[in-house]
Amino acid sequence: MKEIRIRNPHAKAKALLEMNSKQASLQFQQYTTEEQLAIIETVWDAKDREELYYLVPDCAELIQRSPTENVMQMALTHLGTGQSAGILSGASSEQLSDIVDLIAYQNDKLDETQFEAWLMEMLHAGEEVFENMLRSIDPQLLGEFFWNRLKLATSKSNVIPYPAFLVEEALISPEDLSYDTEDTQLLIEMLYAADGNLFQSLMEYIFLEDATAIDGYAREIKARTTREAAKARIAERDKERGITEEDLDKLVDLNHVHLDQNQSRKSSPQNGLTEEDLEQLVDRDNPQLDE
């Protein structure tokens, strides 16, 4: 990293935040990227930090060179409002993937309310942001999220005696589904438009699962596999970056994220299986899970 000439970055950050936006932008752009990042890093408040990023007309480089936790902290201040487009549009696919892993799983299970708000936030941030997220997200995470939210429309499923055939032959489109909410329908339609192959994989994940497999608990076993894979990815990234879960908790409080309740709704409750129940099922039947 190049030498930082600023003796007191925190004082400089405070001074910039007190200036009018035009004056602050002109002065901030006189610094090197390293110096700009040094100034930003001294600011704890997410909204103040975001204001500093926006002093550069194209702040994508600054955002992508920042720790994922900082980007996440700023985005979370807008979660449920659709107002984080500036930050999210500058984030890299890797950063978006990291954030999804971190926000989706809370207390060892999928937080569907928070995850739905995050998906809607990315969608409202623009098609490019949404598509970047889809390219980097674990498809099985989407399968777990949409599992109880989609059904084959009655008019379509009654056409032939074996509706699974429609899925196997890739004959399903968003118009052939019924949805629990309008938000679910919007997400599926945008996913279909962005990546037809991912949509097909999602249909197969949801509709081709044998309901009798492993005493009917195939979904819960798949969900645990997906969750453990995410935890492993998070642990590996934390190790590479030299941070701990305690460090992350200090930067981003995921247990106190304020959501727009009109936009984010809790889905149907899970059936209450414990980790011990799933362990017995896995050990007994040694199922072959999808990669």
Image (cartoon, rainbow, N blue to C red):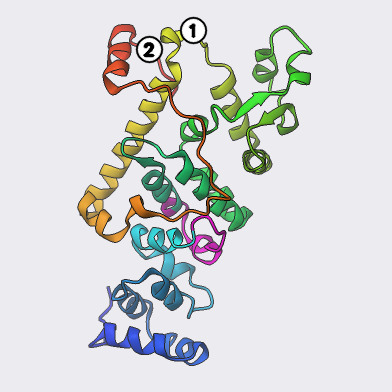
Front residue of 259/128: it is: 259
Please state which amino acid type lies under the numbered disc 1: Thr
Circle 2 residue:
287
Mark yes or no: residue 244 visible: no
Report x, y in % for residue 168: 65, 17
Taking the spot 55% from the left edge, 59% from the top edge, the residue there is: 81
Horizontal side, residue 265 vs residue 234: left or right = right
Circle 1 residue:
212
Location of residue 103 with respect to 216 vertically, above or below: below
Q: Quadrant of residue 101?
A: top left
Q: Residues within 10 Å of mark 2 (few under 14, many from 20)?
A: some
Report x, y in % for residue 54: 49, 76
CA gap between label 1 and label 2 equals: 13 Å
Please state which amino acid type lies under the numbered disc 2: Pro
Location of residue 290 with respect to 57 vertically, above or below: above
- 73 part of magenta stretch: no
Mark yes or no: residue 53 visible: yes
Name of the residue lying farthest toward the front = 261
Question: If you read the primary sequence from the N terminus, does the residue marked by circle 1 or circle 2 appear first?
Answer: 1
SS state under label 2 = loop
- Quadrant assignment for the C terminus: top left
Taking the spot 40% from the left edge, 54% from the top edge, the residue there is: 257
Range of the magenta residues? Answer: 79-95
Horizontal side, residue 33 vs residue 8: left or right = right
**Numbered disc in front, either 1 or 2:** 1
- 84 part of magenta stretch: yes
Q: Quadrant of residue 8?
A: bottom left
Taking the spot 64% from the left edge, 24% from the top edge, the residue there is: 151
Q: Which mark is residue 127?
A: none
